[in-house]
Amino acid sequence: MELIDYFIDNKSQIISLCIEHIKLTSLALVIAIIIGVPIGILINYKQKLNKPVLGITSVTQAIPSMALLGFMIPFLGIGTAPAIVVVVLYSLLPIIKNTYTGLTNISPATIEAAKGIGLTKAQILTKIQIPQALPIIMAGVRISSVSAVGLMTMAAFIGGGGLGYLIFSGIRTVNNYQILAGAIPACILALLVDYFFGAIEKLVTPISLQQEKKSKEKIIKERRRNKLIILFTIIILALLFLHEIDFSKKTENVVRVGSKDFTEQEILCYMTAHAIESNTNIEVVNECNLGGAQVVFSALTNDNIDLYIDYAGTDYTDILKHQPISDTEKVYQTIKKEMKEKYNVEVLDQMAFNNTYALAVTKETAKKYNLKTISDLKKVSRNLTIAPTLEFINREDGLPGLEKEYGLVFKDTIGIDGSPRYTALINGDAQVIDAFTTDGLLKKFDLVVLEDDKNFFPPYNAIPLIREETLEKYPEIKEVLNNLGTYLTDEVMQDLNYQVDELGKSPEKVATDFLSVTNLTS
């Protein structure tokens, strides 16, 4: 019942993301067919290309989709483009292979007879080979189409939209209803796509090959119905794509605001966007939920976005590659100077909250081992399993430096990205996790944050990063963000995160409500 209520309460968002998912998948499939079918025809005529082409497409499918997506980002940036390219690459093998198989399985006697009556190679291909091979070709397209629906969910990982947005958001916030709100429509969509291409497959299959199971009259009636279904679907898709075209005059005053892929960053993304739009004449495009630190910073330096809010510690250690220190002012001034010199990026005033790293345990674990500080862990760490994020494992100001500074040796380290690490902690699969001090999930699960008694973690004050040319063009943004930053304390951010992670509010609503309450919107 609660799941149904969630669908009803968020129906507009689910429908919008579903439409977006359909458009992305359709575009990827059309491109895959346009590329795949000609290649299949080519390797049928040029047999020497058969093994290399099929080998390359097979190897491509063996590459993990997220790895391939990560490889595409530096070349294609963020958003829909890399996601579509990856789905196209994964869809090629069934289409190419079935096209090649369908053409090679045609009887040689049929080809010779066609040559005997004077048909050219092009006529043999269009009038004999392709019509006979179409059922097998469509079977390959049908396989690719179903897998494409599932694969396209990863578009949300880099700000491409689609139903994956709900799935990733649900995983991050440990919200099973949100996960199902993305997964169920994706499953239904996959079934509908399979039915659609199944109808085309039956339509292109000669009646003579279907008469063993059904009468001719029944097959003809079914073919008429399938034609109507296909026509109706094509019209719907055409309307969706036409709706996407904006014929109005575009304004030149557009700023793109990005963010990383967790709750606090989404809230900050919407908050920044609405604050700028409300207090200036600038139009803002949201590019929220793009990925990790390197992905979003690359988007900024590659002109895919214009600004985002980052954290001082991340920029100082992960981007600029300095050793972690606890001097807040030195960290900030170094970032401000080097970001401008190396990347033409301006750093605005630090915001009031410091979302630094922390180690968290359950109250039961803290009581059992008498844990209050990270130093207390040293005596018992060999008996405990830590489940940090993958980024924390690979950062000098994360687990490697922490273990060295405090002399920690954990029984096991299980890398778990996002909010599932909280689930692992609560379920007893791990006893220690990394967290951010403003995480709403700390409040949700009533966890104990261990004191960093050696001040190992560097300051993680939030700092807006903006392209130098953007700030020169829109200097009014500086005043808006500097003013916003004074309102965002540690307690405020943890409460805003809690409203999303536990109370189930959308990041955008939490952001706009806060701006309204604090009179930060004009």
Image: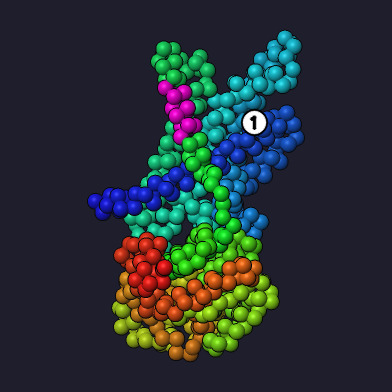
The residue nearer to you, when weighing 137 against 499, is 499
Q: Position of residue 440 (x, y in %)?
A: 37, 71
Res. 187 in view: yes
Instruction: Answer left or right for 403 relative to 118.
Output: left
Q: Position of residue 360 (x, y in %)?
A: 39, 78
Identify residue for label 1: 100
- Identify the residue shown where x is 64% and y is 37%: 35
Q: Is residue 232 magenta?
A: yes
Q: Which residues are magenta?
A: 225-236
- Residue 400 lies in quadrant: bottom right
Q: Position of residue 51 (x, y in %)?
A: 70, 38
Q: Secondary structure under badge 1? A: helix
- Residue 58 lies in quadrant: top right
Question: Which color mode does the image show?
Answer: rainbow
Residue extending farthest left: 1
Q: Quadrant of the C terminus?
A: bottom left
- Identify the residue shown where x is 32% and y is 72%: 445
Q: Is residue 454 magenta?
A: no
Amino acid type at image mark 1: Tyr
Q: Position of residue 462 (x, y in %)?
A: 50, 76
- Identify the residue shown where x is 52% and y is 83%: 458
Instruction: Answer left or right for 6 relative to 167.
Output: left
Q: Dot 1, crowdedness within 10 Å: few (<14), some or many (≥20)?
A: many
Instruction: Answer left or right for 87 relative to 344.
Output: left
- Identify the residue shown where x is 44% and y is 12%: 216
Position of 416 relative to 144 (above/below): below
> Dominant secondary structure of the magenta stretch?
helix
